[in-house]
Amino acid sequence: MIIFYEKDTGKIRGTIEGRIHGDAHLNQWVGGREKVNRIVVNWIKNDAGSYEPDIKDEDQHNIFIKLDKNPISVYDYSIGLVSGKLFKKY
């Protein structure tokens, strides 16, 4: 999944769903690059043979597993401007 968010607020502006991203996805952008940043999360095959997000942070890892099952719920989150991590909006 690629998540595009506003640099000054952390508000999510759009996504590109998927587990593996090639050049076509990586060259796409939502909004202007001067105001919007992105998080790119690829998935890798684990020892059990299933795929999981390639993220070491356990909380973020679990969030991306949830988002994979319900991608539209990404808009229930925002991006921490200092941490660069997803957090649930209240």
Image (cartoon, rainbow, N blue to C red):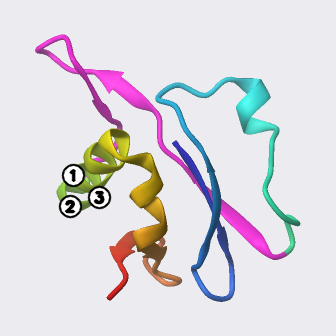
Q: Secondary structure at mark 3?
A: helix
What residue is shown at x 72% (from left), y 33% (from top)?
25
Left of 15 or right of it: where is 19? left
Left of 74 or right of it: where is 45? left
Q: Which residue is mark 2?
A: 59
Q: Are the residues tagged 2 and 1 within 8 Å (C-beta)?
A: yes
Q: Are the residues tagged 3 and 2 within 8 Å (C-beta)?
A: yes
Residue 54: x %, y % from top left: 35, 37
**What is the distance, in whole Å, between disc 3 and disc 2 at their CAs?**
4 Å
Q: Residues within 10 Å of mark 3 (few under 14, many from 20)?
A: some
User: What segment carries the magenta color?
Assistant: 35-56
The type of residue carrying mark 1 is: Asn
Q: 24 or 46, which is in the foreground?
A: 24
What residue is shown at x 40% (from left), y 59% (from top)?
73
Say whether residue 40 is magenta: yes
Q: Which residue is mark 1?
A: 62
Q: Is residue 80 above or below residue 45?
A: below
Q: 56 or 53, which is in the foreground?
A: 53
Q: Which residue is mark 3?
A: 60
Q: Residues within 10 Å of mark 1 (few under 14, many from 20)?
A: some
